[in-house]
Amino acid sequence: MLPPVKGLGLWILPDTDSEKKYLELIIKCADLFESEPFLPHITLSKVPELSLQELEERIVQVAENISPFDLKINEITCRDEPYQKICMECAPNPEFYLLTDAIDRAFGGSFSKKTDPHLSLLYSRAECKELDTILKELKQQESIFEPLRCGRIGLVQFSGTPSTWEILFEVSLEIV
């Protein structure tokens, strides 16, 4: 059983083509290890306590000034945290930092996560040694190392475990 999570946050969401590929991998991993599937994402930041309307306005303001961008996948790893069990570690680049800086400016503080961008493929309490076979299989798929296209920002409400999390609002990245 995964620990419950509560609150609001921002995710970078892959473009719709990439989302399908990653969602298939997440579902496969969840089925193999009897865990919950979730939407592919990179956790970007927490958000201050503001009205939903104000949050949406600020997120739109951020998205209007950032173009879609790619993140290079460096490695696929297993970690000890339940919400970071199998992860695709990404290399932060100038566009990623432009986005995190824009979020901090929009919300007036240090809200963004500037280190360790990653896309999780499995949430689980399984031990890493139990995941060796799937890790080896994933690492042999060349397509998994194609750059991750970041195309949208989503405002997410966490309430419980991943099956109950909900994207409240999403906006495409595009310079207006």
Image (tube, rainbow, N blue to C red):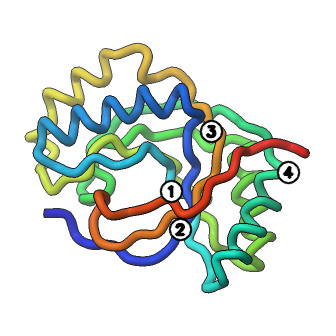
Disc 2: which residue? 9
Secondary structure type for disc 4: loop
Q: Going by the image, does 80 lie left or right of 76?
A: left
Left or right side of 158 for 54: right
Q: Give the structural element (helix, strand or loop) at label 2.
A: strand
Instruction: Give the residue at mark 4.
Output: 65
Circle nearer the N terminus (4, 1): 1
134, 175: nearer the viewer: 175
- Front residue (pair 27, 86): 27
Q: Nearer the viewer, mark 2 or mark 1?
A: 2
Which element carries disc 3, helix, strand or loop?
strand
Q: Are marks 4 and 1 in contact (CB under 8 Å)?
A: no
Q: Amino acid at mark 3?
A: Cys
Quadrant hosting residue 77: top left
Q: Which is more N-terminal, label 4 or label 2?
A: 2
Mark 2 burial class by Cα count in 10 Å: few <14, some 14-19, many 20+: some
Give how far apart the Cα atoms at labels 4 and 3 are. 14 Å
Q: Which residue is mark 3?
A: 150
